[in-house]
Amino acid sequence: EEGLLLVRHLGVQTSSCFAHAPLTRFIPTSSVQDIFIHEGFRGFEVKFYLSVVVRGEEDVVVVFPNVLPRRRVLEGVWRGARTCLFE
C-alpha cells in the first residue's frame, strides 16, 4: 500500500507499507523544489516514476516506489500535485 497526501501551503506526505513495515515521510512545502515524472529501465521495460526534489538533499524522493503506476496515472497525480504545491 502506497500513498501521497498533499496539503496546500503545508507540505507533502509520502507513505509506503512494504512487508508490513510502514514508512512515512513529510516534506514541508518550503523544502519542495520540484516534482516530476522520470523514466527508468527495468530489464527491457521502460518504467515511469514520480519523484519529489527536496532542497538540500542529494537524492530524490520516489513516490509509489513499489507500485510504479502507468504513465497516464502518474500524469494525473503530477498535474494535481503541481497545482496544489505551486499555485
Image: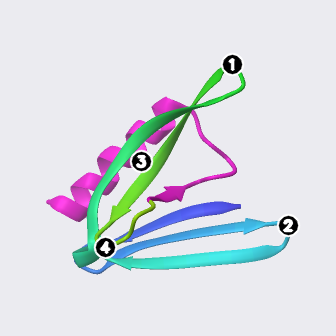
Q: Farthest residue toward the front?
A: 58
Identify the mark nearer the N-term, 2 or 4.
2
For discs 3 and 1, the disc positioned in front in the rendered view: 1
Mark 2–mark 4 Cα distance, whole angstroms, equals 30 Å
Mark 1–mark 2 Cα distance, whole angstroms, equals 27 Å
Q: Could you say whether the residue bearing mark 1 is in a helix, strand or loop?
A: loop
Q: Which residues are magenta?
A: 60-87
Q: Which mark is residue 19?
A: 2
Q: Nearer the viewer, residue 38 or 59?
A: 59
Identify the mark nearer the N-term, 4 or 3.
4
For discs 2 and 4, the disc positioned in front in the rendered view: 4
**Residue 27 counted in the magenta span:** no
Q: Could you say whether the residue bearing mark 2 is in a helix, strand or loop?
A: loop
The answer to the question of whether label 2 and label 4 lie on touching residues, with beta carbons closer than 8 A, is no
Residue sitting at 46 percent across and 40 percent down?
Answer: 74
Q: Which mark is residue 26?
A: none
Q: Which mark is residue 44?
A: 1
**Residue 63 counted in the magenta span:** yes
Q: Position of residue 71 (x, y in %)?
A: 49, 31
For discs 4 and 3, the disc positioned in front in the rendered view: 4
Identify the mark nearer the N-term, 3 or 1.
1
Residue for badge 3 = 77
